[in-house]
Image (cartoon, grey):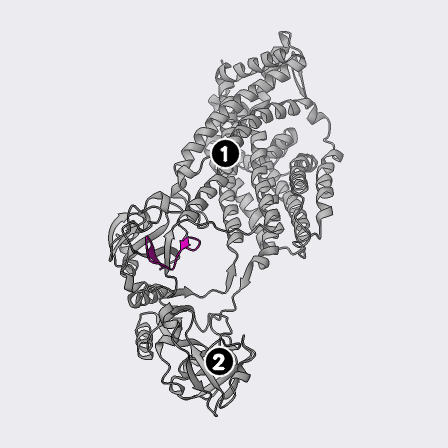
Amino acid sequence: MSAAAWGRDLAIGAKFGVAGGREGWLRTLLTAVGVGLGVAVLLFTTAVPGALSARDARSQARDDFTAQMTDKRGDTTLQAVTETQYGKKDVRGRLVHGESADAPVPPGLTALPATGEMVVSPDLKTLLDTSAGKLLRERIPYKDVGTISDSGLLGPHELAYYAGADADSLPLGGGEVRRISSYGGIQQREPMDPVMALLVVIIFIVLLMPVAVFIAAAVRFGGDRRDRRLAALRLVGADARTTRRIAAGEALAGSLVGLVLGTGFFFLGRQFIGDMTVAGINLFPADVDPSPGLAVLVALAVPAAAVGVTLLSMRGVVIEPLGVVRTATARRRRLWWRLLLPAAGLALLAPMIGQGRNSGRFNQAQVIGGTTLLLIGVVALLPWVVEAVVNRLGGGTTAWQLAVRRLQLTSGTAARTVNGIAVAVAGAIALQMLFAGIDGDYTKPTGADLSRSQMSVYGINGSAAESKDIAAKLRSTHGVRSVATLGNASVATKAKSPETYSNLTVGDCASLREIARIGSCKDGDVFAVTGGWDQGAVEMAKPGHKVYISGSDLLPTDKSRASPMGWTVPADIRTVPVRKSPDGGTDGGGLVLTPGALPALDAGRISRKMFLSLDPGVGDADDQARNTVARISPLYDVRLLTDTEESNRFASVRRGLYIGTAGVLLLIGVSLLVSTLEQLRDRKRLLAALVAFGTRRSTMSWSVLWQTAIPVALGLALSTGVGLGLGAILLGMVGHTVAVDWTAVAAMTGIGAGVVLLVTLLSLPPLWRLMRPDGLRTE
């Protein structure tokens, strides 16, 4: 058959779809909506990498950790990190001071703010201007003089500010103060390890497979009515191949209109991207721009898939001049070739089982091919399972019998309706198993004891009297129950070029009990703590041994360079075991002493940290404590203690999964609703006839519910089995033992069932309208 004949037949079919009367364009519209939703998701998927890259580029441009720094004053900017939290939200803060008229300016600012002034992000400005931001306004009491532009923010909802400060309040070497000569450095990224790369590949497959299934189902909307129209073409002389090509042309028209609608859905949805925050990620709408190459691929693949699926689906249909015979219902579906698909997938994945993280990267082609074949196996097996089960059903109420009979006649249509749900659930279960299995590799316990302390404050320096004053202010803060203060310095065996170092900690008896098991204690006592990081502390702490105390690295440069102070270890020193500090560290190792043991120890050689115990009954206790610390010094590092610490890259992948899952769930729900409405419209006269014969509306409603529930139950059962199998294989590939979180499995299947139930409920009002007797009217 020549290309000209193909083109002519496809053009005729497209014309029937667009200009074939009310039935023709309505079917084309339904197909276009289904395809358009899938295209929109595909376009968003192709745009995600570019959006994240743009986000990373802005992050790199403003990064002050990899920025160019210098020790000499010139065209430079002094900058200190003052990041904080408000409630559960992170607030990015920086104190800046320009050392010349040409000092570098961070991206998003036109000029550095003057002392006491600040430039804020739009969302932070909104928050500070409302009563909800009252506590935060107390913490950053600078005058608002401008707004950070988009180039200086990661997303439209980021909370950030730059505040001006004088040079004296930004001592170099103290905490996070840096002298920057140019913003924007090169962030060195570690290569993604094989397990993480595998996880990313699986996520893309799992998210895109349901989209492909829905697009394939959408191009088959209204198949029964279309086939009856094609029978008329046979009556006027068209052969079977010509009618199939014309049918493909109708699907092609729907897919082309769907491309237009999908593009419109994409641009419409993109306008609301800035208002959405999923798992902490917020994007600018302008960044969500599909890659041209991938967009062209989508534009070519969708129409080609529409034609291919239509031709493939019509192999089981015999169109004759006087009617249509569907051979699929006369001949039972064959099982053997359906089993070949998952078997081939297993054959591709099996050689990589046990490879693990340390055996090189996984073959991505094999991973993609094997996983795709396993998930396609769900699509292939579900029609056979539905047909095999419903053919054995019978009896029951009138609603049940109506539903079962309908499923027996159109089991393939029922299976297509839930194929997307089945594939999504199977992939979600496998991903959940993989995430749960490798979570321990990327989420480590910090060792923090939250029963003793929930917050820490680092970088405090000053005299003992000043530290007591700070501790007193914190203790008087609403929601703070207790404060433990520990001073830190270094101790060595020599004043110059020492070879042996140890840690020295100063604090009152109650505070020292947080890091060492000291037993009885009074001011003036000295202890050598064993079991910490410094195993040589006992040798250094021999009675009568002279040691030299130097400043902590957290202190400003001029103070930390003070001459080491000599001190003789007293004869009554006691050796005690270490105790993990509230933050999980063992920094109590070394010499530990009370203030009375060394009154001459000056603030120039010591920095302090504090551990705060908060009242759980005060909801904003952490914010109250942060405000107190900020009033003392905005340079102090305040942190909430946590049980675990998660890899940033792993957390980013997890957030990406949440974003993609949200989009796929939306597609599933809307596409299922469109599919259900199309099926109801196709059976309008049958429904009207049943009502005319006296069938109750409740019976018909239950019938529709059973027609949905039976294939959904079978699809979820099949997808659960395939998902568990795929999850077990993936865990074997990364070298982890197989473990199933049945609660998570139940949650995944429950979400799938919930989406279908919601769609069924939304379809009831149209169903009731279609059951009116006037639905029998014809012209």
Question: Does residue 626 appear left or right of residue 301 in this picture?
Answer: left
Q: Position of residue 66 (x, y in %)?
A: 44, 53
Q: Position of residue 198 (x, y in %)?
A: 62, 47
Given residues 548 and 509, the one toward you in this image is: 548
What whole-number distance in Å separates the C-alpha atoms at marks 1 and 2? Answer: 63 Å
Callout 1 crowding tier (Cα within 10 Å): few <14, some 14–19, many ≥20: some
Q: Position of residue 64 (x, y in %)?
A: 40, 54
The residue indicated by pointer 1 is 291
Q: Residues in magenta?
A: 64-82
All told, the count of numbered labels is 2
Say what secondary structure mark 2 lies in.
Answer: loop
Q: Position of residue 602 (x, y in %)?
A: 35, 79
Taking the magenta stretch, the answer to whether it contains residue 65 is yes
The residue indicated by pointer 2 is 494
Given residues 501 and 21, the one toward you in this image is: 501
Say what secondary structure mark 1 lies in.
Answer: loop
Residue 563 in sight: yes
Identify the residue at image location x=45%, y=47%: 278
Location of the N terminus by quadrant is top right
Taking the magenta stretch, the answer to whether it contains residue 510 is no
* SS assignment for the magenta stretch, majority: loop
Residue 706 in sight: no
Residue type (three-letter) at the residue carrying disc 1: Ser
Identify the residue at image location x=56%, y=26%: 300
Q: Earlier in the sequence, mark 1 or mark 2?
A: 1
Q: Quadrant of residue 424?
A: top right
Q: Is residue 202 above or below residue 299?
A: below
Given residues 660 and 692, the one toward you in this image is: 660
Circles 1, 2 touching at the beta carbon (< 8 Å): no
Q: Is residue 230 above or below residue 640?
A: above
